[in-house]
Amino acid sequence: MEKQSIKGISRIDSKNTHGWFVRVYYARQTHSKFFSDRFNGGYDDALEAAKKYKEEYEERHPESTKKQPFRNYPQINNKTGVNGVSETFSKTRKGIKIPYFSVSWCPEPGHMCTRKFSINKYGRDEAFAMAVSFRKEKEAEIMKRRGLQSKK
């Protein structure tokens, strides 16, 4: 048994469960299916069934395979409603909380950047507006660098 590394397909081996788990994302939803070794003819056959399922799924939904430079919508736990902008705080050595809006972006794959906008310094509304504006600037830069159309 050789170790496999296929995007969207992972191995599950627990006490009573052995097989391959396929996970793809489409239309803001996760679509998944499990391929048991037991019901698919063993380790290798279950892996082949998982690969085939994923390939057929991506043929039916080609837009699910397009890699975007950033999400088109905020994550479910995002409380600001703006993708890449979160409200958080840091603590001083004396334990005093300092609130700010944090902007995150990836100018290049695998390179994460952040910038803080102080709520104490600018006020809540102004700090939020600055953070949102900055994030939109970074998105436009990324889209331009990659030769993609800018989002409206």
Image (cartoon, grey):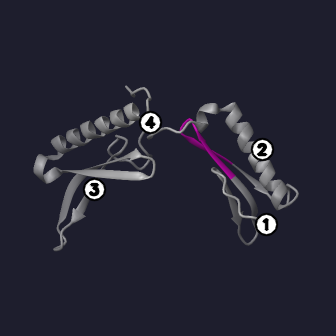
User: Which three-letter amino acid code belongs to the residue tagged 2?
Assistant: Lys
Q: Which residue is mark 4?
A: 72
Instruction: Measure the C-alpha gap from mark 1 to mark 2.
Output: 19 Å
Coordinates of residue 4 in the picture (x, y in percent): 70, 59
The residue stretch that appears in magenta:
22-32
Q: Relative to residue 89, is residue 126 depicted above or below?
A: above
The first of marks 3 and 4 along the sequence is 4
Which is in the foreground here, disc 3 or disc 1?
A: 1
Whether pointer 3 and pointer 2 mark residues with C-beta atoms closer than 8 Å, the reply is no
Which amino acid lies under the numbered mark 3 shown in the image of this protein?
Answer: Thr
Question: The disc labelled 1 sits on which kind of residue?
Answer: Met
- Mark 3 or 1 closer to N-term? 1
Disc number placed over residue 52 in the picture, else none: 2
Picture quadrant where residue 146 is located: top left
| Distance from the alpha carbon under mark 3 to that under mark 4 | 22 Å
Tell me the quadrant of the picture where the N terminus can be found: bottom right
Provide residue 54's location: percent of width, then percent of height: 71, 43
Image side of residue 93 versus residue 4, left or right: left
Disc 3 from disc 2: Cα separation: 43 Å
Which residue is tagged 1?
A: 1
Q: CA distance from mark 4 to mark 2?
A: 28 Å
Q: Residue at x 85, y 60 (%)?
A: 42
